[in-house]
Amino acid sequence: GAGVSQSPRYKVAKRGQDVALRCDPISGHVSLFWYQQALGQGPEFLTYFQNEAQLDKSGLPSDRFFAERPEGSVSTLKIQRTQQEDSAVYLCASSLVMGDQPQHFGDGTRLSIL
Amino acid sequence: AQKITQTQPGMFVQEKEAVTLDCTYDTSDQSYGLFWYKQPSSGEMIFLIYQGSYDEQNATEGRYSLNFQKARKSANLVISASQLGDSAMYFCAMTSPETGNQFYFGTGTSLTVIP
């Protein structure tokens, strides 16, 4: 497709379960970002990849959060031993290169932890 | 550290009127970029407009314009001739090379266009 694709669109999990969220960026986009958006808030940065290299993971809230982009295209955000406070929308964005480029966002994954 | 402030949680505008959404920012970086995004209830973030810190002219994209006042550190979004489809959340964001180009977002403004 032409845009950033995220799956699943919705995910419900029980507290303590592991989840994996997928992001398929726009073809050829070097930079990939993950954001967490709590209800009624703006997105908050989690982590950033340039190709397969994870250059910044300073926004990951705990060591339960892990992201990878092994071949420099598709990325997966994994959350282990989920907690209720992990409930949020997880947004993936990609941009062509670094710098003042607009980031193109996917529709997000709405994660609900019961 | 970067900080974006949007002081208007909710705004109402009559259809076909213009509306200004406020955004102020705080940064010590000399080079930075400012963006506005629209987020409808469906959840996707739609890029609207971009202003670079060194751009002397205000950015315009169709019905969107950015009122950039560098000395005041403000980057207000002006939407002209509002349409019902403009009802959405609007987020101001900034980025800079010094912070790895991650976006810092404000808390957003909910715009409702009244027919």
Image: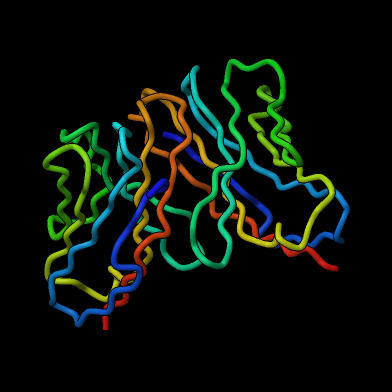
Residue visible at 13% across and 76% down in the picture: A17
Q: Position of residue A23 (x, y in %)?
A: 28, 53
Q: Position of residue A111 (x, y in %)?
A: 31, 71
Q: Position of residue B73 (x, y in %)?
A: 63, 30
The quadrant in which residue A91 appears is bottom left
Q: Is residue A103 above or below residue A81?
A: above
Q: Position of residue B83 (x, y in %)?
A: 78, 57
Number of numbered discs present?
A: 0
Residue visible at 13% across and 55% down in the picture: A63
The quadrant in which residue A70 appears is top left
Q: Is residue A93 above or below residue A42?
A: above
The quadrant in which residue A88 appears is bottom left
Q: Specify how the rendered protein is coloured.
A: rainbow
Residue visible at 56% across and 67% down in the picture: B41
Question: Residue at the front extreme?
Answer: A1
Q: Quadrant of the N terminus of chain B?
A: top left
Residue visible at 54% across and 33% down in the picture: B26
Q: Is residue A55 above or below residue B54?
A: below
Horizontal side of residue A72 vs B110, given as left or right: left
Relative to the observer, which residue lies in front, A13 or A4?
Answer: A4
Horizontal side of residue A104 vs A77, given as left or right: right
Q: Is residue B98 above or below residue B108?
A: above
